[in-house]
Image (cartoon, helix red, strand yellow):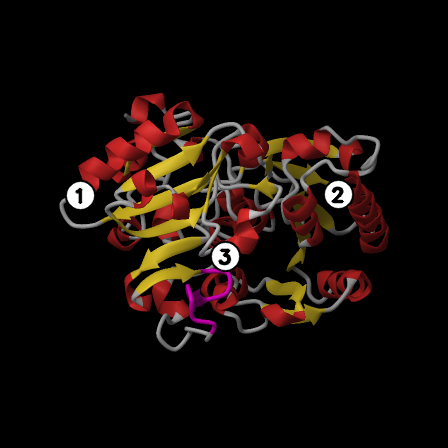
Amino acid sequence: MSDDLPLHDVYAEPTLADVLPSVLASSGVPGEHNRLGLSETERTVVLLIDGLGWNLLRRNVDAAPFLNGVEARPIRAGFPTTTATSLASFGTGLPSGRHGITGYVSDVTEAGGPFNWLRWQRVGDRRDASARVVPERIQPSPTVFERATAAGVVATTVLPREFAGSGLTRATLRGARFVGTVAYGDLLHSTVHAATAGERTLVYCYLSQMDTLGHVYGPGTEGWVAQLTIVDRFVEDLVARLGPDVHLVVTADHGMAVVDPAHRIDFDTTPDLSDGVAALTGEARCRYAHAEPGRAAAVLDRWREVLADRAWVGTRDDVVAAGLLGPDPTPAALRRIGNVVAIAHGGTVVVRTEVEPRMSRLAGQHGALTDDELLVPLLQV
């Protein structure tokens, strides 16, 4: 069934996993590959705007004249198109099948069940799980920031203060000096200061508000567009303050799709979906169904019947054969993918109104392989 997937070999084209290795290569670090062909420079700032897909940016030229007026092209986020997976690929330079952070929620053996990577908590348990799911063990590959520091590049992450020491930060961004921020003002100041902290510098900074508004109101709505204008002015100001000796790269972790209420399917109230499923992970537009022993085939048949043409439904083996996880996925990554995988088409979502009531109401979602979700900007100033 992999032949009818909407996309094969996600990582055959440049993705987020290529951004930071290309930055290091452009600053002369040996052993790094400049797949993106970035210009040679000793100082680079990478700004990641959460949720700002390429198509969304190009549909809103009037709201973001600066971002739409610089050198730009689309690259791919990776699979699935969700923040935890994308940030892991960005921070490690690896596809999802190698770093093993396979979705918003994965079935993680070390956690004893479904695990939320962003919160670093077992689902249903609000306690931090870092002592049990040790970030440096669960994702042991060196990060790009560790490689940068080892090569003498001064690496800094300028991120919301609450991210300091979090499980995801330790797993995917370790190796850089962490600078915490609380608003746009100190984000701007700290980024500019860090960019000139050494002869060779790499600074990563992050904006989350586009994603939040897209989820709550829907991408392209009035409030979302107003926020895009604020972000556009922030980037223009950042460029002016950085000056000509610092290279700015702007990208995003994923885009977003508008939910179609007519195609909102509730796992918690649809027995044909839930029967025989021991755990449901992933998120609304990319679901992993972990079948009870001996019931995988029946679960697959029912999911295909219920979702029909509203989603691609196949097996874990189909996903691997299609190259969605990249080459040579690890055994740990494969264990975190369900027996049955559903990747949404159009505006379809598979929600959980009882277990995930807040997420089930969101107007914008991501995770699947539509161009609106998969394509992200690569802007260079």
Residue 167 pos. (x, y %): 47, 68
**In the image, which disc is placed on residue 199?**
none
For disc 1, the marked residue is 295
Tell me, yes or no, if residue 79 can be seen here: no
Secondary structure of residue under mark 2: helix
- Image quarter (top left, top right, bottom left or bottom right) of the N terminus: top left
Q: Earlier in the sequence, mark 3 or mark 1?
A: 3
Nearest-to-viewer mark from 3 and 1: 1
Task: Look at 69% across and 65% down and name the residue there.
Answer: 198
- Image quarter (top left, top right, bottom left or bottom right) of the C terminus: top right
Q: CA distance from mark 2 to mark 3?
A: 32 Å
Q: Is residue 24 above or below residue 181?
A: above
Is disc 3 surrounded by few (<14), some (14 to 19) or many (20+) residues within 10 Å?
many
Q: Nearer the viewer, residue 380 or 373?
A: 373
Is disc 1 surrounded by few (<14), some (14 to 19) or many (20+) residues within 10 Å?
some
Q: CA distance from mark 2 to mark 1?
A: 43 Å
Q: Amino acid at mark 2?
A: Trp
Residue 317 pos. (x, y %): 24, 37
Q: Is residue 191 above or below residue 164?
A: above
Q: Earlier in the sequence, mark 2 or mark 3?
A: 3
For disc 3, the marked residue is 144
Secondary structure of residue under mark 1: loop
Q: Amino acid at mark 3?
A: Val
